[in-house]
Amino acid sequence: MAEHEDTTDPKRGATIEDYFEEDRTFPPPEGLAAAALTADRSLFDRADADFEGFWADQARELAWFERFETVLEWDLPFAKWFGGGRLNVSYNCLDRHVEAGLGDRVAYYFEGEPGDTRTITYSELLEEVCKAANALHSLGVERGDRVAIYMPMIPELPVAMLACARIGAAHSVVFGGFSADALRGRIEDAEAKVLITADGGWRRGQPVALKANVDAALSGGAASIEHVLVVRRLGDAAPDTAMTDGRDVWWHDTVDGQPAHCPPEAMESEDLLFILYTSGTTAQPKGIMHTTGGYLTQVAFTHKYVFDIHADTDIYWCAADVGWVTGHSYIVYGPLANAATSVLYEGTLDHPGRDRWWSIIEAYKVSILYCAPTAIRTFMKWGTEHPTAHDLTSLRVLGSVGEPINPEAWIWYWTHIGGSRCPVVDTWWQTETGAIMISPLPGVTTLKPGSATFPLPGISAEVVDDAGVSIDRGGGYLTLSRPWPSMLRGIYGDTERYRETYWSRFEGKYFAGDGAKIDDEGYFWLLGRVDDVMNVSGHRVSTTEVESALVDHPTVAEAAVVGALDATTGQSIIAFVTLISGVEVDAEHGEALRKHVATKIGPIARPKTIIFTDDLPKTRSGKIMRRLLRDVAEGRDLGDTTTLADASVVEELRNRAAAQPGEE
Ligand code: WT7
C-alpha cells in the first residue's frame, strides 16, 4: 500500500487528476482540407468577435416566414433565441429543398434488417409528411398538442416526427426498446393525445412486437391518449396484432388516402418542437424540452461543418437510433435541413453476419459514418477480417459519440475502418445540449486520439475546479459558460428541477455532469461522469483514463472500471475486461494488464482486481452500466488479485442487467 500513502504527491487532492498521456497527432488530410467547407480559423474568429452575430448568421441560413428581431434574450437560466422570428422545421427540411429543385435527391436509403430496401426522395418525403400531417389533424391533433411516438427504425418514424413539426404539435419519441411501464410514464408526463407506433420491428432476424407493449401501457393508464396510429411493419409476421375499436387505426388506412398537401404552421422560434426523456439519478426521467429556431440553427450548422457535408455527393450514415437525441439531431433534423442523403438502417450490428455494417457501407458507398464507441469496441473484439472483406474506400469522415472513445479504439477505427485517411471527429454533447458542442472540424483541427479537441465556434466551454474557478490546465468539471441556440429550454413540467439539476452547482454556468481535463495545448479530454470518478487514497482518478490504459493493451477490446469500497484506500479500482476474440485468458494475463496500467499511467491507477468477462452490461444506448458493476464488485469478496473468467460473476452481471427496469 506504500505507493498510496505518499502525501507529498502534488496531485493529491486535485479536483480530478490526469495521468493518461497521448501524444500522437493527426493533422487534417491534405486532400480533405483542400475541398473542405472550412479549413481555417475564420468561423472561430467570427464567433469570438461577436458570438450572437455569429449565431444570427447561422440562423439566417434557414428559411424564416418572419425574420427574427432579437438574437438572444438571456435571463439565466432561461434563454430565448431569435425572438419574433417565425419558421417551420418541416418546411426547412423538405419544401425549401424541393422548391430549390432538389426534389429528386434521395433523402433516405432505407435498409430494413431483413434486407428490404426503400429509396425516398425529398419530394416523396414531403408528400408522405403532408399526408401524415393531415392524418394527425383528422385524429384531432392540433398546434400545441403532444404526440408520443414509439416505433422501430423505419421511414415512418422520421415521417411522423416531421408531420408533428409541420402542424405545430410537439413529439415525444420513446425508444422502441423501452418497456410498457416506461412508455406509460412518458405518455402521462407529457399528456400526449395520440400515440404513433407499429405492429413491431425486426431484430436479429426475429419479429419484435411493439403493439402489445402499447396495449399494456394504455390499459394501465395514459388516459390522455385518444388514438393510436399503427404502421404495419411486420404484417403476417405479427398475426396477433390487436386493434381497439374507436381508438386504434392503421397507418395505411388513415394516412395513405390523405391529400399530399398540408400548409406548414408558422411557429414561433421558441415554440416547443419536441420533448425527449432522459434518465437521471432519480427514478423519474426528465422531459428535456427543445424548441424550434435555435435548435434547428445549431443542428444544421454542426451537422454541416462537423461532418463537412457536401450534400450533393456525400452519402451520410448515422447508425444511432432515432429514439435517442443523436437520431433526432443527426438522422432527422440536421441532415434534412442540409438536404443531405442518409442511410437509415433498422437493425443490429451482426445480423445476418458480423459484417452487416461494412456491407451497407460498400453497397451505398457511404462517405460519412457516425456511430458510438461501444459499436467500435465490439467490432474490435470481433476482429479485422469482417471490415477487410469489404470495400470501404468510399468513407472520408468518421464520427464518434456517446462516450469517451479510448485512444486505442480511435486508432482501430482510424486504421481499419477509415483506411488511415479519414479524420475521426469525436463529438461531445448531450440530450440537453441538443447539438454537438465540443468536436474537431475535419478540415481544420489536428486530432489527438481520445480527445474531443475544442469547443465549436460559438460555444464557450470551461473546465472548473470545486470552487467553480475556471482552470486552463488539468482536470475538473466541464461547464458551459454561455447560452447556446440548441440548449434545453427546461424540464417539461418542472422548472425547479431544471434550475437545480443544471444551474445550481456553479454560479452562472451550466454543469454537464462530466469530468474533463485540458492539456498543455488546450485540448479537451472527457473523463466520464463525475459520479463515477474514483477516490483512491485521496486521489481522484478518472474511470475513463484507466479504461483507456487497459484498452491500450493489444489484447483488450473493452474495459469498464469502477471504484469499490475499500477499507484501506477508500475505494479500490476494479476492472471488468473483455479480450479480443481468440485471446486466451490465463493466470498471468491479469497481472500483465495490472502492470500495463501502472506503467501507462502510474501505480495509483493499478486495478486491484481484474475480472474477465465476455460482455459488459450496457444501457440500451450503449453506455456501460458502471453503477451495476459497482454493486457487483461491492457485493462480493473479489479478493486481491485477478479473478479468472469467473463464471458466477459473469452470470451475475447477466442476471442483474436483465433485471433492470426499462429506463436503464
Ligand atoms: C453524455 C450524454 C450526445 C448524444 C448521445 C448521448 C457522454 C457523449 C461523448 C464524447 C465523452 C461523451 C457524456 C455526456 N458523452 N458524447 N464524445 N466523449 N463522453 O446523449 O444520453 O444525453 O448522454 O454522454 O457523459 O454527458 P446522452
Image: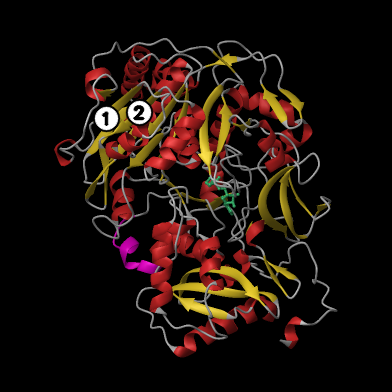
Q: Is mark 2 within 8 Å of ligand 1?
A: no
Label 2: which residue? 196
First to last magenta residue range: 380-391
Nearest the viewer among 652 and 84 is 652
Residue sitting at the far front = 220
Placement of 401 over or under 215, stated as above or below? below
Label 1: which residue? 231
Residue 464 can be seen, yes or no: yes
Placement of 443 over or under 377, stated as above or below? above
Residue drawn at (61%, 60%) of the image: 448
Quadrant of residue 25 in the image?
A: bottom right
Q: Is mark 1 within 8 Å of ligand 1?
A: no
Nearest the viewer among 397 and 248 is 248
- The quadrant in which the N terminus is found is bottom right
Residue drawn at (50%, 72%) of the image: 576
Q: Position of residue 636 (x, y in %)?
A: 52, 76
Q: Is residue 333 left or right of residue 53?
A: left
Residue 314 can be seen, yes or no: no
